[in-house]
Amino acid sequence: MSSDDIDVAASSAEDAATRRVRDAAAERGLAIEVQASPRASSLEEAAALRGITPADIVKTLVVKGRGDDAYLFALIPGDRSISWPKLRALLGANRLRLPEPELALQATGYERGTITPLGSSTDWPVYADERIVGRRVSMGAGAHGWTLYVDADALIEAYAATVADLSDPVETIRR
């Protein structure tokens, strides 16, 4: 296989993943904008390249709950970290964790760094940190090198997401 063949195969995989995201958004009546996104070495650089603040980049975290097949999506502003105690209290759960990359891929159909609830292979429950309400946010678009922009309120409504205080400032990360 030549490098051109590899590039075409990678491009086809990206097209399929972002197409899945676009199709899922259309099915839910959700307006999104998908754009190519250059690699960045930090959150701050990514925000600067996109012309937004770090808080406007939303991380979609796949969280594994009780049982082998129980997952959920947690939408966390880029400048904050998930608060495990807050999420456990909200869910009434004793144990939650981030799954290994291969389990996250299996649960969503997306690799880490590209994950979004849109077009996930399973519609897991969505929990959104209250700080994204009222914002236009950028998040994974299903493939590396791509980002999507969406009105957070419309995303929350489209997925009947639970909105709550789910995060802590980065400097006060707690387990």
Image (cartoon, rainbow, N blue to C red):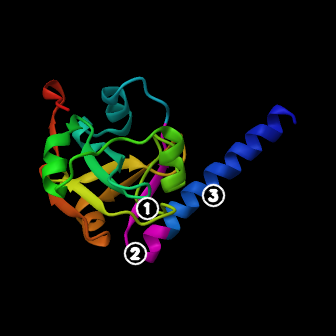
- In the rendered image, which residue does mark 3 sit on? 16
User: Residue 2: horizontal and vertical position, in percent?
Assistant: 86, 34
Sequence-wise first label, 1 or 2: 2
Q: Residue 57, relative to residue 159: is it above or below?
A: above
- Residue 36 marker: none
Q: Distance between the residues labelled 3 and 2?
A: 18 Å
Local SS, label 2: loop
Q: Distance between the residues labelled 1 and 2?
A: 9 Å
Query: How many neighbours does mark 3 have within 10 angstroms: few (below 14), some (14-19), or many (20 or more)?
Result: some
- Amino acid residing under circle 2: Arg
Residue 30 shown in magenta? yes
Residue plotted at (87% across, 36% down):
1
- In the rendered image, which residue does mark 2 sit on? 28
Q: Distance between the residues labelled 1 and 3?
A: 13 Å
- In the rendered image, which residue does mark 1 sit on? 118
Q: Do the residues labelled 1 and 3 touch (CB within 8 Å)?
A: no
Please state the extent of the stretch shown in magenta in the rendering: 24-37
User: Residue 14: horizontal and vertical position, in percent?
Assistant: 62, 49
Relative depth, front residue between 140 and 81: 81
Q: Are marks 1 and 2 in contact (CB under 8 Å)?
A: yes
Residue plotted at (31% across, 71% down):
158
- Amino acid residing under circle 3: Ala
Query: How many neighbours does mark 2 have within 10 angstroms: few (below 14), some (14-19), or many (20 or more)?
Result: some
- The answer to whether residue 27 of the structure is visible from this angle is yes
Q: Do the residues labelled 3 and 2 touch (CB within 8 Å)?
A: no
